[in-house]
Image (cartoon, rainbow, N blue to C red):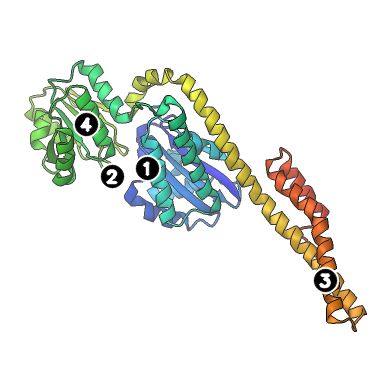
Amino acid sequence: MNLVLAGINYKTAPVSIRESIAFRDDDLPKAFELIRTFSEIRESAILSTCNRTEIYAVTNSLEMSDVIPEYLARYHEIPSKSFLPHLYTKEGLDAARHLFVVTSGLDSLVVGENQILSQVKQFFRRAQEAKSLGTILHRLFQCAILAGKRIRHETTLGENPGSVGEAAVELAKQIFGELKEKAVLVLGAGKMGRLILEALTSAGVSSPMVASRTFEKAKEVAEELHGIPYSLDDLDQPLQKSDIIITATNAATPVLKRARLEGLMRERRFSPLFIIDIGVPRDVEATAGQLENLFLYNIDDLKQIVSKSNESLQKEMVKAEEILDEELLKFQTWKDSLQVIPIIKALTFRMEEFKSKETEKVFQKFPNLSEQEREAIENLAHSLINKILHRPLVQLKTFADHPLGIEYLEVTRTLFGLGEKND
């Protein structure tokens, strides 16, 4: 069984490409249903956030260069050539290490952010619910989550971590300076929406407006964070009042279309409107940025802001890498041990075959043996086999930790003819 990974992220693809192969939470049952139709894929897990979409798989072969892109193209109904130039693939330990790095927040736009750990847990649960995980991916995600927890507890990366939402507010501060007198509307009342509202409150914004699909959800968040609630279906008034709009709705299609914003700008007599769209897929139609006095930013515009804060974390990142390598070695040792178990079983079975055949020959040659004599012969044969196998079995169990373990296992397989028909 081979571990493989294929995906895109904010380093390899712009948001226009990332959104084209993103998976929303509601998509996952259908997504796993399709992936099960690919016979080459034995286990699978999907990880899809605003900054990445990755497919982890255990396959019959490492020749997976076409299978996962074909799956992505079929599910999203787009030509694979549209995202192939941005796709990265990894195999074996490299694929495992990548998930560890991602889960630890070391590969995030905002290094050390806590959201990615909870997101990995969420997608792990979704894969479990879909029964798409087998022994290897189940253990891989458990080990990656443990590594992420250790890094957050044993380094300062988990102390006062930033988030994409906070970076969006920081961008607004760079544009306007003080935000105290600005009217700010947040579209989305999920986890990211909450983080944005908390950052706005810290920045001095009083009574930020928040809108959700349901007014009840917006009201719940607004009461907690001292905001003003609205429904996404009733945005005319807050849109008119806003100086800044920050969107994070997790909607499948844009909630603010160009035509609507064009009419809004006329009604506002083209007073400046700044929109920061951190949704993937995007919440605002991209061409709206062409409108006069409407300044549209997306999640990729946050890179320069967070890169400065990431520079100060270099020492802690080194510590985190050391923890990551420790946990990765544990996973690799466990995975290597999976190759030892079948050989141990095969060797034990082969010796039992020999014992049975040879004792049967003795019984046929001496048919008048008593039951007590037969039992004594069988016990002797059993004892000899156990004594002969004891040291080889002990050594085999240590091969998982040995640098040449795989080679030793192959030698054992060849010496004893394991996997061949026994004469």
Check disc 3 and give the amino acid type: Glu
Left or right of 239 on screen, residue 114: right
The residue lying toward the viewer, choosing from 50 and 406, is 406
Check disc 1 and give the amino acid type: Ala
- Give the quarter of the image for residue 369: bottom right
The residue lying toward the viewer, choosing from 414 and 220, is 220
Left or right of 311 on screen, residue 218: left
**Residue mark closest to the camera, 1 vs 3:** 3
Residue 99 placed where, x, y %? 49, 38
What residue is at 61 percent from the left and 41 percent from the top?
A: 332
What residue is at 49 percent from the left and 50 percent from the top?
A: 44
Residue 363 placed where, x, y %? 88, 78
Q: Earlier in the sequence, mark 4 or mark 1?
A: 1
Q: Earlier in the sequence, mark 2 or mark 3?
A: 2
Is the residue 259 above or below the residue 1 in the image? above
Residue 310 placed where, x, y %? 41, 21
Check disc 2 and give the amino acid type: Ala
- Give the quarter of the image for residue 279: top left
Badge 1, how many Cα within 10 Å: few under 14, some, many 20+? many
Mark 1 lies on a secondary structure that is loop
Q: Earlier in the sequence, mark 4 or mark 3?
A: 4
Is the residue 178 above or below the residue 3 in the image? above
Residue 175 placed where, x, y %? 23, 18
Q: Which residue is mark 3?
A: 378
Mark sitting on residue 342: none
Q: Which residue is mark 2?
A: 252
Per the model, the C-alpha gap separating discs 1 and 3 is 63 Å
Per the model, the C-alpha gap separating discs 4 and 3 is 77 Å
